[in-house]
Image (spheres, rainbow, N blue to C red):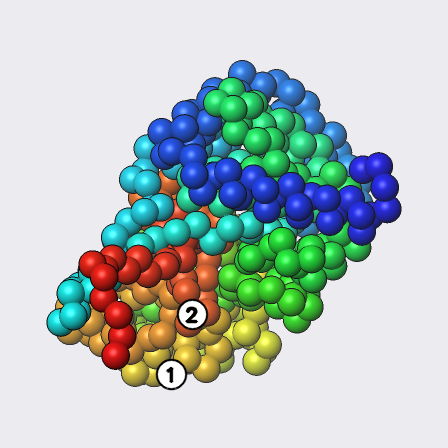
Amino acid sequence: MSGSLAEDMQAIGRAAREAATVLRSASAATRNRALVKAARAIRANARKILSANTQDMAAARAVGLSPAMLDRLELNEARIAAMAKSVEDVANLADPVGRELARWTRPNGLDIARVATPIGVIGIIYESRPNVTADAGALCLKSANAAILRGGKESMHSSRAIHAAMREGLQAVGLPDSAIQLVPTTDRAAVSLMLEGLGGAIDLIIPRGGKGLTGRVMKEARVPVLAHLEGIVHVYVHEKADPQKARAIVLNAKMRRTGICGAAETLLIDRSVLPTLGKAILEDLAKAGCAIRGDREVCAEFAAATPASEEDWRTEYLDAVIAVRTVDGVEDAIRHIETYGSHHTEAIVTEDAETAARFLNALDSAIVMWNASTQFADGGEFGMGAEIGIGTGKLHARGPVGVEQLTAFKYVVRGNGQVRA
């Protein structure tokens, strides 16, 4: 960065706006070729990316970054391969731009179509998640949006190495480098400038990180924000749950990866099955290293549990800790989730279809599941290739945000000389 921070950030915004104009006219085939070449560059530069990540991990351990954040930060060969495949998967998706969402003809002969269009310039602010550099860049490029990426200081070396690979893909097909830009500073003031919109250059901000980051973005942004604040995810084990399914689902939902937003944070168990199936589930969790914070009945049934406080029902642990509460049926479970939930993801385990339907229909969360682990709350698992985050708001997009959710629309009106009286 050559000038003052404000000047340099304004220049990034102008370049992104110019790139967005180019992308709007670029063919889907060109954008797809850029993504395929970017995926190849990620694989070809795997050693450089791993070396950069080693620097980030060492610095993160030195400052005492939490285990959950370290897990998000760490890259290995398998994760790099998955990152490259995710970029290819995005390339293979149908083109989200130009889709005809609706079309009708008025009595006066006017032909009106609602057509999907790019949003324009999207700013993505994220913490210790270097894979977001590839996922966000790929999703924005596929949807013909320019991206301004601002990764956290914990992942800066990794993000720069991944960004270099994404730029290779753009350069290989003649698209401007500025279609995917990485803010080259860890100065927190750069975030403030992005939240102000860079002089009108940024159309949408998407935060990807913890409550502190997301809360700041939602509070300070002067442009629209697409985000979720917390992932207080619930799994409800109904009295008619299949024991084998219930044990497998709860253990996976909590312990597969504790640091992701789809990890279960609260377990609700019907009182009638607490001494049998409930106890077996708690034993599974404890053996896997999960701390259990339970209500009075849970603590009485399971000696290893510690008493839960009121705050536990509102906590996103992102760690090997789970809050457990007994409930009296599906209506009680729904009341608890509506009281303490964050409208992210909820799951019910039951073989009773009527009860499942009540749960799925009554809850207002972005994702509701029946007999499946909440760890599937992920754009890649939904067949979206990748995701840029989970939306829990009521406007524009909810749930995993993929390429279709990164489009707006316009109306195309075709006439034959009509004039209005």
Q: Residue at x 28, y 49 (%)?
A: 99
Q: Residue at x 43, y 39 (%)?
A: 25
Q: What is the crowding at mark 2: few (fewer than 14 residues within 10 Å), some, or many (at least 20)? A: few
Task: Work out whether 315 lies above or below 175.
Answer: below
Q: What is the crowding at mark 1: few (fewer than 14 residues within 10 Å), some, or many (at least 20)? A: some
Q: Is residue 163 left or right of residue 302?
A: right
Task: Count numbered badges in the picture.
Answer: 2
| Tag of residue 335 | 1
Q: Could you tell which of marks 2 and 1 lies nearer the N-terminus? A: 1
Among the 4 quarters of the image, the one containing residue 213: bottom right
Q: Residue at x 30, y 83 (%)?
A: 331
| Tag of residue 153 | none
Residue annotated with mark 2: 395
Residue type, numbered disc 1: Arg
Task: Work out whether 88 lies above or below 419.
Answer: above
User: How far from the left and from the top, in percent, is residue 399?
Assistant: 40, 60
Where is the C terminus found, in terms of image quarters? bottom left
Among the 4 quarters of the image, the one containing residue 205: bottom right
Q: Marks 2/1: CA distance?
A: 24 Å
| Label 1: which secondary element | helix
| Label 2: which secondary element | loop
Looking at the rendered image, the disc whose residue lies closer to the viewer, 2 or 1, is 2
Q: Is residue 98 visible?
A: yes
User: How far from the left and from the top, in percent, is residue 129?
Assistant: 60, 43
Please tell me which residue lies in front, 137 or 275: 137
Please tell me which residue lies in front, 395 or 25: 25
